[in-house]
Amino acid sequence: MEKSHAHPPEKSRSFAGRRSSDSPGADESNNAADPGSAKSTGEIEGRETVDVTSLGIDVGKINLNQVCQEIDTFVNGMCKDNPSTLDLPDSAEVFLGLVEGLVGKYDSGDSMKLGNADGEDVEFFNALESLSKLTNALGKYPSHSTEMTAALNRASCAQQRAMTFLEEEFRALLEHSKVPDTDRAKKINSKSSFKQHDSHESDRCVLPESNGSGSAEEVYPGYSPGAVTSMGRIAHAMISSGYKSECSQMYGVARRSALKESLTKLGFEGISIDDLQRMPWESLEGEVNTWIRVVQKSAAVHFPGERKLFDAVYANYPDMWNELFGTLSQSVGIRFLDFAGAVAMTKRSPEKLFKFIDMYETIRDNLPRISSHFEPSESAEDLKKETSSTLYRIGEVIVSIFSELENSIKSDVGKQPVPSGTVHPLTRYTINYLGYACEYWNTLDQVFKEHEKLQEKESDSKPVDSVDHDVGLPSPFLKQIAAVMEHLDSNLNAKSNMYRDPSLRYIFLMNNGRYILQKMKGVSQVYQMMGELWGRKRSSELRQYHKSYQRETWGKVLGCLSHEGLQVSGKVNKPALKERFKTFNTMFDDIHRSQSTWVVSDTQLQSELRISVSSVVVPAYRSFLGRFGQYLDSGRQTEKYIKYQPDDIQTSIDELFDGNPNSMGRRR
């Protein structure tokens, strides 16, 4: 039979429409062997149709691995020797027939499936690798002989059919993890030859809600080890056969879609800057919480999971990572940063501080983790630059919020003093605000350090007076705390002047000063850095307020108990004595009536005040009563002027600063 020259078909970059709608085991276009027959036959153009058994080989006893080795030996010889001296071995026809049969059987899914038997899969992929080598070798000398040209034509057709099958198998495996329910999983499994370990449940591992555990990293993206192994073998077979672009396109599209779907399920959807600007803070705060959760999970679960999957599937092709995910990482990272930048453009106020700190920490701690999964590239470098820029913008927002806090303290000029001299709401708000802020000490110190670097250094800048320099230079954030407290002290001093009663003014200053000192002691890091000098100064101020209170309140009372002026020529002046008792009773009643309504909320300070008052007043009254009480006539006169016994005075003092207007001392 006259031989005719044939050329290998061009490799199509699209697999659409390649498969025949007829039986998957037979394809007229590529003369594949009938997978159901007991023997494989092949027609090489220019040669008679050869029955494999005519070569003297029992099909049932053919060792596929041995045939592959013979093909590999022939290919190696073509590479080393002059191909004109080499003849196509008979084993080539046997090999092509066997490969066509294997592809047909796997493609039909009736008798062989990927994942059913690992040994069969290994033989199948080894055969495809030998087929790729043979096709490439024959393709270098397409016109050497009609026999080799025909073999190339047949090998190319077999390879194309194999790649068509692998492409569909690869797509089915990739899309399998995206199936949200069991029914759809079964539907895909009916199309895929990948074997399920459990026919009643989806093989997909559902990613649990974030609970801080590391278990999520193990299940994302949800493929079983068998599926990953099959995908790795398919990817290697396709790439080594020259189908790298098709393989990477399928994988990239599927995984990018899966990642975006995962982010959407977590609640992260694009919101325009205009919508963010109009959104109430309560709603925006919820969006920020979602954003934080998504970024954290992406850094801890999604991108590491994608990296692990890629490393398993493309173990021999690590350079493809940036090609597949470089753009994706940049686009996802930029989406995260765009959201943060848009929030930073909203109206600033002190109550937003902690969300901005959370956002700052989220970007600082997680975006580099996402970038770390990528090799150095232009897109990775762009993401790093954008991350630094966004951190700077949010840091400046944080600094400006503290400036807003200072301004709000300075502008708080109430016209009425707080009742009972208690702790002012501004004091509670400011000190608690600083206390919460100090929980982010390291982050805020970092923010203010970066801010200082960008500011011009003033040569005449002075250190904060309240800082103990024995502990070294204050941190930038400590300076900010000291500045806020200085504004608060000035404001409280101004507010104390609104009290008409000087005694109540000092109670107000003691209440607020004590509250500040105790709260700052509770923040050990701040108290230690502020230093003992700061603590001693605060305590000294409190003692001074205490002394001033005693002088203003009890100085005149103690004056009534003085012995001076009660004796004339060695005799007690009874009218003067009666007036002294009467004045004392009136003054003590007035003090008790008013100061029992005052409030000292700190129990220790309250106790200290009562003890200090009683330690002075009770002994003085007992001495005065013991010395002069006998000069008053017993009966009604005594009861009229001596209203209190020393124990009654003590009881009344113990009722001071309770905020109870109904408190009254026992009367005789």
Image (cartoon, rainbow, N blue to C red):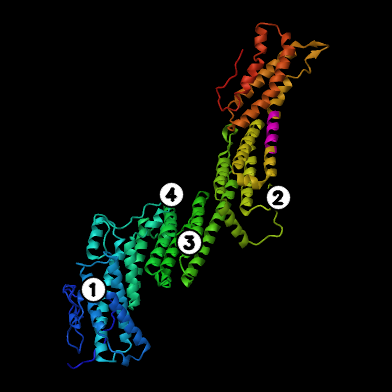
Q: Is residue 545 magenta?
A: yes
Q: Which structural element holds mark 3?
A: helix
Answer whether residue 21 is magenta in the image. no
Residue at screen point 59% across, 54% down: 445
Q: Which residue is mark 3?
A: 369
Q: Could you say which quadrant of the image residue 140 lies in? A: bottom left
Magenta extent: 540-550
At label 3, the amino acid type is: Arg
Numbered disc in front, either 1 or 4: 1
Mark pair 2, 4: CA separation = 43 Å
**Residue 1 image offset from top left, x and y in percent:** 17, 92
Which residue has dot 2 on it? 469
Nearer-N-terminus badge (3/1): 1
Foreground of the two, 81 or 294:
81
Q: Amino acid at mark 4?
A: Glu
- Along the polypeptide, which appears first: circle 2 or circle 4? 4
Q: Is residue 137 above or below residue 274?
A: below
Using the image as rendered, state which of residue 436 and residue 26 is in the foreground. Answer: 26
Q: In this view, which residue lies farthest toward the right? A: 569
Identify the residue under disc 1: 102
Marks 3/4: CA–CA distance: 30 Å
On the picture, is 158 further left or further right than 624? left
